[in-house]
Image (cartoon, grey):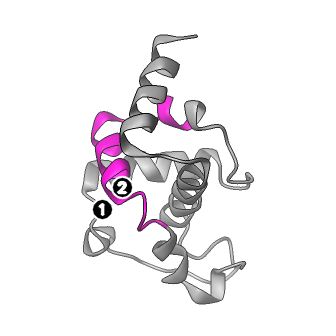
Amino acid sequence: MSQEHDELFQIQQISNLKPRHFADLIRAAQLIFDPAAGIVGSHIIVDWQEFGIPCDVEENLKSLGQQYRYANPDIPGVIIWSQLTPATRNWFIKNKDELWKFEEAFPPLDED
């Protein structure tokens, strides 16, 4: 086991992070990268700070959203965790139960 994997395991035990939280984070990152979800002719400008996302966290999530733009959100947590900055990790733990709301803020784009 890698040190990062051990760290994630400890964090999961303390913060109660579940696979669904990581999936919600990926879906949120995809929206932050492309709020229009690839809809041709649609251009949406979002002030993510109004959603409580600091600029440095937004940049990290935007990068993650670009990387996993077309991916299924069920990416193993250890892979996602390794790509998060310390600020994004803290923000993620604090907001893990609110991430699903980002998808709901864009109802026409919500696949559910």
Residue type pointed to by label 1: Ile
Q: Which mark is first along the chain, 1 or 2?
A: 1
* Residue drawn where x is 44% and y is 51% of the image: 61
Separation (CA) of disc 2 from disc 1: 6 Å
Range of magenta residues: 80-99
Packing grade of label 1 (10 A; few <14, some 14-19, many >=20) is some
| Residue extending farthest bottom | 108
Circles 2 and 1: CB distance less than 8 Å? yes
Mark 1, residue position: 53
* Residue drawn where x is 59% and y is 88% of the image: 107
Disc on res. 58: 2
In the rendered image, is residue 78 in sight? yes
* Residue drawn where x is 35% and y is 35% of the image: 85
The kind of secondary structure element at disc 1 is loop
Q: Is residue 91 magenta?
A: yes
Q: Who is closer to the viewer here, 82 or 22?
A: 22
